[in-house]
Image (tube, helix red, strand yellow):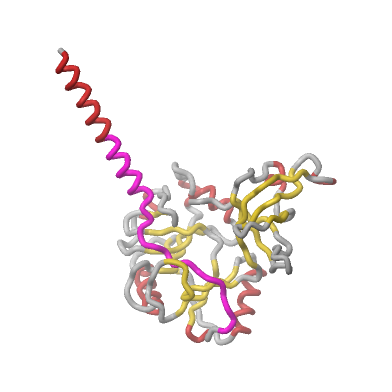
Amino acid sequence: MFFNRIGKVNWCLVGAVWLWLISSAGASAETDPGPVPLLAKVYRSSIDLSNWWVSEKLDGVRAIWDGKALHFRSGRPIYAPVWFTQDFPPQPLDGELWMGRGTFERLSGVVRKQNPVEREWRAVRYKVFELPEAEGTFTQRIQQMEQWVQQAAPPWLQLVEQRRVESEAALMQWLDEVTTQGGEGLMLHYADSLYHGGRSNDLLKLKSWRDAEATVVEILPGKGKNKGRMGALLVESREGVRFRIGSGFSEEERQNPPQRGALVTFKYTGTTRRGLPRFPSFMRIREEY
């Protein structure tokens, strides 16, 4: 009887260890980020624009297709409907899930659901702008992307349009057109760059304003029309600078403001001599997908 009990205990231990190993392996697979995505630096006006491709910077959700499944940049899975990805190529892709200009909040709500809503995903497009770990220059990769998209791809798998610009004046004119129509800005990709991950000077972003992240330190009460709800957020930048953000909030956000400790994205037009952002305006809570 004693040895039988010992045997049962040992088998229980073995079973528990086995389940732990399986769950650990599953968790690792679920958060495996796959190819390291290329990240942009800020545009500088001294570059020779004849060596660059330019596209609109989409205000969507970054999504990596590893040849089998979609996931966020963090490696977390995107629970897209089966029909959405079943005709995607085996080639890894990098792009943005997108529903149009000015739709980020609605899009974010759609793609974060673990139980996808079919009718909501009908409005989503996957806009491809890179082939992770592919050979050749970016110009050659553009040609490869065009081939993949043209080969019986579903209509929601689309290539981000890449253009050449002749001068900085033409570049700024295009930027004005995009921002006037509700777009976020432009992206510049060095034509002869070979693929590599991480933040790089081979990819630049150009906006009419800057953006950054800060942590909510305190929720400040409102006055006047905002009495009884949030008036502003006291936040702290990554550099340890504290300042207030009092604009850019919707009525709903003033009623239910970001909580203390939340990371928020804000836009601004430059900095003061003391290093404070000029005209900071709230954009969104920074979600770690």
Q: Is residue 9 left or right of residue 261?
A: left
Q: Is residue 6 left or right of residue 79?
A: left
Note whether 117 is above or below 122 in the view shown: above
Residue sitting at 51 percent across and 82 percent down? Answer: 164
Rendered image quadrant of residue 257: top right
Q: Between 225 and 265, which is closer to the camera in this rendering?
A: 265
How far across and how far down the image is residue 245, in percent?
A: 71, 54
Residue at the right extreme of this rendering = 224
Q: Is residue 80 left or right of residue 256?
A: left
Number of residue marks: 0
Note whether 214 is above or below 21 in the view shown: below
Magenta-tinted stretch: 19-46
Residue at the top extreme of this rendering = 1
Q: Between 42 and 17, which is closer to the camera in this rendering?
A: 17
The verdict on residue 35 being magenta is yes
How far across and how far down the image is residue 122, in percent?
A: 48, 52
> Can residue 127 be seen at all in this image of the molecule?
yes
How far across and how far down the image is residue 79, in percent?
A: 42, 47
Residue sitting at 56 percent across and 61 percent down? Answer: 59
Rendered image quadrant of residue 9: top left
Residue sitting at 60 percent across and 58 percent down? Answer: 238
The verdict on residue 162 being magenta is no
> Can residue 80 be seen at all in this image of the molecule?
no
Q: Work out which quarter of the rendered image holds the N terminus and state it.
A: top left
How far across and how far down the image is residue 246, in percent?
A: 74, 53
